[in-house]
Image: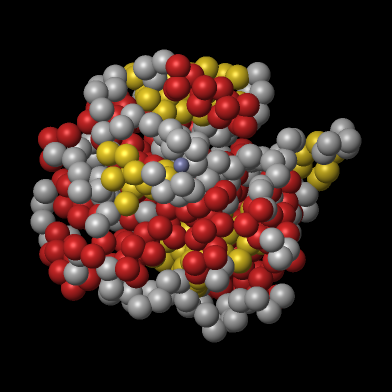
C-alpha cells in the first residue's frame, strides 16, 4: 500500500490523511510505494497489454499505470481519458535549437488543453475518496480550467482563485463554462496561492494545487508514457518549463521510480527552463553550483515576478525542494530565457505544425541557449515537453505575428519585442487581380 512521506523529516502518514504538507515539520509530502514489490518486466508487460483494452481506466494515459498510483476503486476514478499525448519529431525546431534532432511530447493535446489534466484526474479522484464536495485552487489559468472540468465530471463544486487581469482569456473562458466559482484576487499568483492554502487549512475546501502530492502522482505518468512510447528506452534528456515546479518534480519522480523498478537503467537528465523575470530556481541553481554549504540554501522568492508567459509567472514556487532533488538525482541543468527568446522560439515551434502556449516555448529557447553554451551536446536524444495548447493564449500569438507584442517594464517603460519570425497577414481588395498579385500566381 502506498503512503505519504515527508521529504524532510521522513514522517509517514496514511494516504487517507487529509493533509497537504507534513504535520510535524511543514515539509512537502511524497506518495511512496513499496518499490521492492515491483518487477520491471511485469510492469512493462501489464502496461503494454492495457493499451489494447477498451476500458476507460486502461485507455487513460494516467490510470493505465495504476500499479504506481494511489489506490482508488474503479468506480471512484474520475477520468477523461487524459494522456496518450504523442511525441512529435520537430525538424525545424531542432535546427533552430542546434540539435541533430528534437522531439516534442505535446501535453497541450489533453482534454482541457494542458498537462494539468494528468494531475487533476488523480487529484479529483483523491478528493472523492476523502469525501470532499468542494475543491479549490489558485491558478495562473490552466489549473483552474482543468480543475473546473474534472470537478464538474465528479459532481463537485470548484472554487478558483485567479490573479487580477493576468490570466489568458482562453483559460478563464474554460473555468467559467465548466461552472467554477471564479474569484479574482487583487494581487498576483503568489498572493492567491498563499490565501488559498490558508483557506484550505481552515475550511472544508479541498486544495488541488500541485503542493497536493496526489496531483503530482498523475503528472509523473508523463515520464511513464514517454518511456512506453519509446519502447521503454530512456532519452538522454527531458526539457521542461518551470513555474511552480510541480511538473518538473513529478516527471523526475516518475523516472526515478521506473529506475528503481528496473524498467530503465539510467535516469534521463532534467533541464528546467524559466523565464528571466520569474526565475527564482535559476538563481538558486547558480548559488548551488558556487556554494559549499548546499544543504543550507533556500530559494529566494521574487516579489514582482514578470513574464508574458503567464503560466510560469510565479515568484515563489512551492515545489522547489522537489525540483532541486530531481536536478541532483539526474545531473540536471537550469536555464533562464528572455521574453524575446520565448517569443521567437514559440513561432518556430508553430512552424513545425505543433504550436503551443508561450510558457511551453521556453523549452526550445532554453535548448538553443544550452547547446550554444556547450552544455547540451547537439547529438543528444532530447525530448522537450510542450505544456499547453496554442489556443490558450491567442492574443499573444496574433500580437507577435502582427508586430505588436510588448509589455511595460518595472520602470513603466514600454518594451517592444521584435517579431523575427512573423507571419503577418495581407489585406487586399475583393478582386481577382489583387489576389493573383498578392499570391504571385
Ligand atoms: C502550469 C503550467 C506550467 C508550469 O508548470 P509548473 O508545474 O507550475 O512548474 C507551464 N506551462 C503551462 C502551459 C502550464 O499550464
Ligand atoms: Zn516533516
Residue that extends furthest to the bottom in the rendered view of this protein: 379
Q: Is residue 286 left or right of residue 82?
A: right
Q: Give the residue displayed 62% in from the left and 57% down from the top.
A: 295
- Number of marks present in the image shown: 0
Q: Give the residue displayed 77% in from the left and 39% down from the top.
A: 407
* Residue 423 picture quarter: bottom right
Q: Is residue 57 something that shows in the picture?
A: yes
| Image coords of residue 176 (percent x, y) | 44, 22
Q: Is residue 165 above or below residue 347?
A: above
Q: Is residue 439 something that shows in the picture?
A: no
**The C terminus lies in which quarter of the figure?**
bottom right
Q: Is residue 181 above or below residue 190?
A: above
Front residue of 422/55: it is 55
Front residue of 196/393: it is 196
Q: Is residue 50 left or right of residue 407?
A: left
Front residue of 430/106: it is 106
Q: Give the residue displayed 32% in from the left and 68% down from the top.
A: 260
Front residue of 180/4: it is 4
Q: Is residue 103 left or right of residue 219?
A: right
| Image coords of residue 367 (percent x, y) | 61, 68
| Image coords of residue 51 (percent x, y) | 17, 60
* Residue 74 picture quarter: top left
| Image coords of residue 32 (percent x, y) | 32, 51
Q: Give the residue displayed 22% in from the left and 71% down from the top.
A: 40
Q: Is residue 55 above or below residue 293?
A: above
Amino acid at each position: 500500500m502506498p503512503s505519504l512521506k515527508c521529504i524532510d523529516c521522513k514522517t509517514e502518514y496514511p494516504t487517507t490523511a487529509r493533509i497537504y504538507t507534513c504535520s510535524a515539520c511543514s515539509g512537502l509530502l511524497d506518495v511512496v510505494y513499496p518499490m521492492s514489490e515491483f518487477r520491471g518486466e511485469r510492469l512493462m508487460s501489464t502496461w503494454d497489454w492495457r493499451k489494447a483494452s477498451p476500458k476507460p481506466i486502461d485507455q487513460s494515459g494516467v490510470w493505465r499505470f495504476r500499479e504506481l498510483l494511489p489506490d482508488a476503486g474503479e468506480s471512484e476514478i474520475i477520468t477523461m481519458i487524459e494522456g496518450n499525448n504523442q511525441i512529435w519529431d520537430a525538424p525545424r525546431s531542432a535546427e533552430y535549437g542546434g540539435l541533430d534532432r528534437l522531439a516534442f511530447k505535446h501535453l497541450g493535446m489533453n482534454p482541457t488543453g494542458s498537462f494539468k489534466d494528468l494531475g487533476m484526474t488523480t487529484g479529483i479522484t483523491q478528493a472523492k475518496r476523502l469525501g470532499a464536495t468542494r475543491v479549490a485552487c489558485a491558478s495562473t489559468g490552466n489549473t483552474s480550467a482543468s480543475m473546473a472540468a474534472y470537478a464538474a465530471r465528479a459532481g463537485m463544486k470548484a472554487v478558483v482563485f485567479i490573479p487580477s487581469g493576468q490570466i489568458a482569456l482562453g483559460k478563464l473562458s474554460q473555468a467559467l463554462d465548466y461552472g467554477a466559482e471564479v474569484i479574482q484576487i487583487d494581487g498576483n499568483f503568489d498572493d492567491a496561492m498563499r490565501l488559498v492554502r490558508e483557506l484550505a487549512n481552515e475550511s472544508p475546501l479541498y486544495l488541488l494545487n500541485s503542493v497536493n502530492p496526489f496531483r503530482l502522482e498523475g503528472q509523473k505518468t508523463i515520464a511513464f508514457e514517454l518511456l512506453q512510447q519509446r519502447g521503454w528506452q530512456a532519452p538522454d534528456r527531458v526539457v521542461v518549463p518551470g513555474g511552480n515546479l510541480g511538473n518538473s518534480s513529478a516527471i523526475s519522480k516518475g523516472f526515478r521510480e521506473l529506475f528503481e523498478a528496473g524498467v530503465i537503467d539510467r535516469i534521463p537528465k532534467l533541464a528546467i527552463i524559466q523565464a528571466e523575470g520569474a526565475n527564482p530556481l535559476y538563481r538558486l541553481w547558480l548559488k548551488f553550483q558556487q556554494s559549499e554549504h548546499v544543504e543550507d540554501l533556500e530559494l529566494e522568492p521574487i516579489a514582482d515576478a514578470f513574464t508574458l508567459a503567464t503560466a510560469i509567472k510565479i515568484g515563489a514556487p512551492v515545489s522547489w525542494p522537489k525540483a532541486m532533488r530531481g536536478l541532483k538525482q539526474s545531473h540536471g541543468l537550469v536555464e533562464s530565457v528572455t521574453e524575446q527568446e520565448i517569443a521567437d522560439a514559440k513561432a518556430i515551434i508553430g512552424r513545425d505544425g505543433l504550436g503551443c502556449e508561450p510558457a511551453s516555448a521556453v523549452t526550445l529557447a532554453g535548448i538553443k541557449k544550452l547547446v550554444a553554451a556547450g552544455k547540451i551536446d547537439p547529438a543528444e536524444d532530447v525530448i522537450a515537453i510542450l505544456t499547453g495548447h496554442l489556443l490558450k493564449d491567442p492574443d499573444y500569438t496574433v500580437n507577435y505575428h502582427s508586430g505588436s507584442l510588448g509589455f511595460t517594464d518595472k520602470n513603466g517603460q514600454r518594451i517592444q519585442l521584435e517579431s523575427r519570425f512573423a507571419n503577418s497577414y495581407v489585406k487586399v481588395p475583393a478582386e481577382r487581380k489583387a489576389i493573383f498579385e498578392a499570391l504571385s500566381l
